[in-house]
Amino acid sequence: MDKLIEVNELFFRYNEEDQWILKGVSLFVKQGEWLSIIGHNGSGKSTLAKCLNGLLLPEKGSVRVNHLDTRDESHIWDIRRQVGMVFQNPDNQFVGSTVRDDVAFGMENHGIPREEMLIRLDDALKQVQMEAFADREPHRLSGGQKQRVAIAGIIALKPSIIILDEATSMLDPEGRSEIIRTMRLLNKEHGVTVISITHDLEEAIYSDRIIVMNHGELLDQGSPRDIFKETKLLKDIGLDLPFTVKLRQELQKQGCPLSDRALFQEELVEELWTLRSKI
Amino acid sequence: MDITVKDLTHLYNPKTPFERIALKDINVQIKSGTFLSIIGHTGSGKSTFIQHINGLLKPAKGEITVGDVTIKAGEKNPKLTALRKKVGLVFQYPEHQLFEETVEKDICFGPMNFGAAEEEAKRKARDALDLVGLPESVLNRSPFDLSGGQMRRVAIAGVLAVEPEVIILDEPTAGLDPVGRREMLSLFMKLHKQKSLTTIMVTHSMDDAAFYSDEVMVMDKGRVVMKDKPEAVFSHIEKLQSLGLDVPETIKFLLQLDERCQVGIGTPVFSIPETAAKIMEMLGQGREKGARV
Ligand SMILES: Nc1ncnc2c1ncn2[C@@H]1O[C@H](COP(=O)(O)OP(=O)(O)O)[C@@H](O)[C@H]1O
Ligand SMILES: Nc1ncnc2c1ncn2[C@@H]1O[C@H](COP(=O)(O)OP(=O)(O)O)[C@@H](O)[C@H]1O
Ligand SMILES: [Mg+2]
Ligand SMILES: [Mg+2]
């Protein structure tokens, strides 16, 4: 198993007089996985994300990306290139006056030669299916299109990891599925590791692993099936449960003899079908 | 407060090369006390429509009547102030529109704008703050020091302080976490009942539209395609899907179950307990049929 990111006993606060925002967080991210981070507002998810690409540095403990320590200044540009971030608000991420300029901007900053740049630009726009929009002004695009341009800007730098920080929460349902579809493709076909900070549990159940943050601590981690078995733990910290889990529990409450297994709708449908045919 | 919209058409940039029909011949009646949700694709005209109800936009054709105020296309000097006092509009991301240096001043802006004296406005600000569930201690703080959810509540208090009879919410839960969403929606339900409001909510959540509303209105390309009780609207599954819209999670599940077990889905239900009860009934039916055969 290849650990792309290793976080060890990470402590962080924004000011020395303040309380710790991250309190001894340890975790790893595996090459090629889709990792979701859930937890309510203020639990430290965005702060953690910014520590992962060296935008913020640990006060105690360490963050290593591909074995490079984020506190080592000589590697910081490499780390930022390897760990791209897409933020919540699609309007705040543009610098270029056209989609093409915007995607090129990041590459210029990283000193990529012009010829190489042109190749990567076409390639990146194709991967997010925005090649037809290269000459458009970013601010005239829909929310989902804006986020895809932001993703193109990142993949042009050939990153190992893309972090989505609630990147779909301001989008309409169509924009949301555009982004998830694009990211699944990058994850499956191009081996990009994805870390998705999200409140959408119907998205999170499809991840390889989930991390639960609460008050700056890592409360739990595991496969979606394991995480959503701990329904009491999640309810206690005020988090919701996926639809299927809620429905399954309600059915059990009403006397239906179901197992505790179903996480996806199809699984619950299958169990109900089996029950019905036995009757 | 009854709302009647007749033959409403709206053009953006009229008589220019950029002219665009955003609403086309809309006829709608909304009875006083209704909780109406509006659903539809981005660009279908939802925001344009609701801005006519408080007079922010003027019709190119047709008329809008709210209570005893009527706004007609082409009319000079319409009674906009009267309309805006009755109809409070909470924009999408209303926290982006806070601007005063204290919460109190921000909330007082509306009432004072409609002629309230300072003392009266301050009293209304306190009441409104209480309605949205914020403590008085935030009155003297800068709105910009508050959390996102609190800022949104302040913005909503600013609209409530004017004591409108109709409240319009443009995607009020966008960008909130699940706890924030639930709190925000129960706040609007509480206000709707307590203040006997007419509430109009634009939303992308089919679950919320189905669960909270008396009526759901579906828009597509500037027209109203359906307006009916949630059970009726969400029975037209193929129609909704052809418009690129989703159906509530409960219906999605029942559809899958039906595909596997051919049990039919019957009258749509939108809460988890009701869905579970329906499934239990279907299982029970299976047993009865089995016994009879
Ligand atoms: N730039 C900042 N300066 C000071 N405090 C901050 C800053 N950004 C976030 N915080 C605080 O850190 C805590 C965690 O915030 P954040 O990482 O944004 O959580 P989440 O993304 O889970 O909502 C919150 O209490 C928040 O107020
Ligand atoms: N200020 C404006 N100028 C020109 N066209 C506009 C303006 N606002 C909205 N439109 C257009 O009017 C149509 C309806 O938009 P809108 O009412 O915002 O839809 P919705 O709220 O359903 O997303 C869209 O085609 C949109 O592009
Ligand atoms: Mg965050
Ligand atoms: Mg809108």
Image: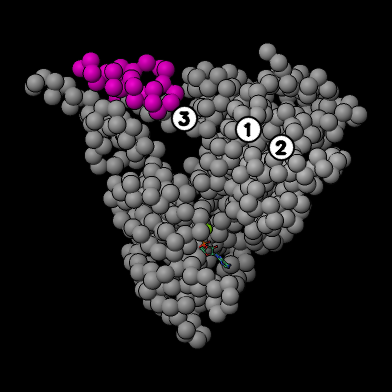
Whether residue B196 is visible, yes or no, is no
First to last magenta residue range: A254-279
Q: Is residue B31 left or right of residue B12?
A: left
Q: Is residue B221 left or right of residue A95?
A: left
Residue A58 location, quadrant: top right
Asked if residue A270 is among those painted magenta in the image, a careful observer would answer yes
Which sits earlier in the primary sequence, circle 1 or circle 3?
A: 1
Quarter containing the C terminus of chain B: top left
Write down the chain letter for disc 1: A
Q: Residues within 10 Å of mark 1 (few under 14, many from 20)?
A: some
**Amino acid type assigned to the residue bearing label 3 in the image:** Pro
Residue A186: mark in rendering: 1
Q: Secondary structure at mark 3?
A: loop
Q: Residues within 10 Å of mark 3 (few under 14, many from 20)?
A: some
Asked if the residues shown at circle 1 and circle 2 are in contact, with their CB atoms under 8 angstroms apart, the answer is: yes
User: Does residue A157 lie above or below B170 as drawn?
Assistant: above
Q: Label 1 to label 3, Cα distance in Å? A: 25 Å
Q: Position of residue B69 (x, y in %)?
A: 41, 77
